Amino acid sequence: MRHRRLAVILLVVTCALTVQAQSGRRQVKPEPAAPVPSPTPEPTPIPKAPHKEPELLFFLGADRDTFASFSYSYYDAVLRGCADRLRSGSSAGVDVTDRGFNRADAIKKAKAESKSYVVLLSLKLDTMARSYDDLVLEYNVFAPGTAKVVTTGRSYQRATRAGPVVVGPNTRGSNNTIYREELLRQAGEDAGNRILKAMNLDVEIPH
């Protein structure tokens, strides 16, 4: 009986020591999981404005095949002036050809077009000319599809001139090519003004 009690006591003591040893151990906690980064939102693309074709179009050409042998730079000057004025005075798209473009070409081009008004520019000597440089700019505008003349008229080299034209040092002589080209460019601007006015675009012609 005594031996049995001793065995029981030893068993209880052994269990108590085991429990105490286990409770004294440091429990290893798992490392917290790293937070998953949230995806960066993509920037909202800015919608592009749809390309809109201009409702009004002009096609410009100059009749370079005349009997008078004017400098080609003169034709370039009137075309540049007229085209710039049509662009700045309206929302029209403007196309310019640098090739010879006579009346027959202008009529053919206008009949083949559905939207573009065809503008034909021509340089001629003034009937009251005192010199070879007294040039007049004539313009004709043909309607698309029918080639009907919408407007026609003349513009003179000094029509839009307000005071002396200064294009550089020593360039104010009447025989100077640069000076002459500037006057013709202004005549082209005046023609563009008159074309816009005739087409009821409410563009005031400067004096």
Image: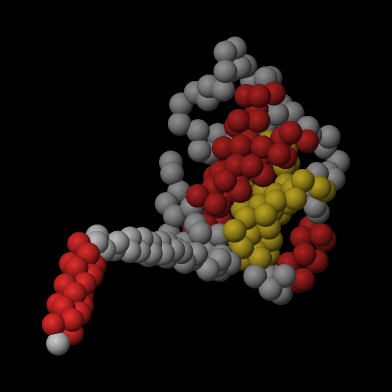
Residue 19 position in % (x across, y down): 20, 71
Q: Quadrant of the C terminus?
A: top left
Could you tell me how many numbered marks the image carries? 0
In the visual, does 52 lie left or right of 47?
right
Q: Residue at x 61, y 37 (%)?
A: 185
State whether residue 61 is above or below residue 188. Answer: below
In the visual, does 74 lie left or right of 29?
right
Determine the image quadrant of residue 141.
bottom right
Determine the image quadrant of residue 186.
top right
Foreground pick, 121 / 85 = 85
Q: Can residue 23 be seen here? A: no
State whether residue 17 is above or below residue 131. Answer: below
Which residue is outermost to the top?
170
Q: Residue at x 42, y 52 (%)?
A: 204
Q: Quadrant of the N terminus?
A: bottom left
Residue 201 position in % (x across, y down): 47, 62
Residue 162 position in % (x across, y down): 45, 31
Q: Residue at x 24, y 61 (%)?
A: 25
Foreground pick, 9 / 36 = 9
Q: Can residue 58 be seen here? A: yes
In the visual, does 73 lie left or right of 100?
left
Residue 127 position in % (x across, y down): 70, 39
Q: Residue at x 21, y 72 (%)?
A: 14
Which residue is outermost to the bottom?
1
Foreground pick, 104 / 135 = 104
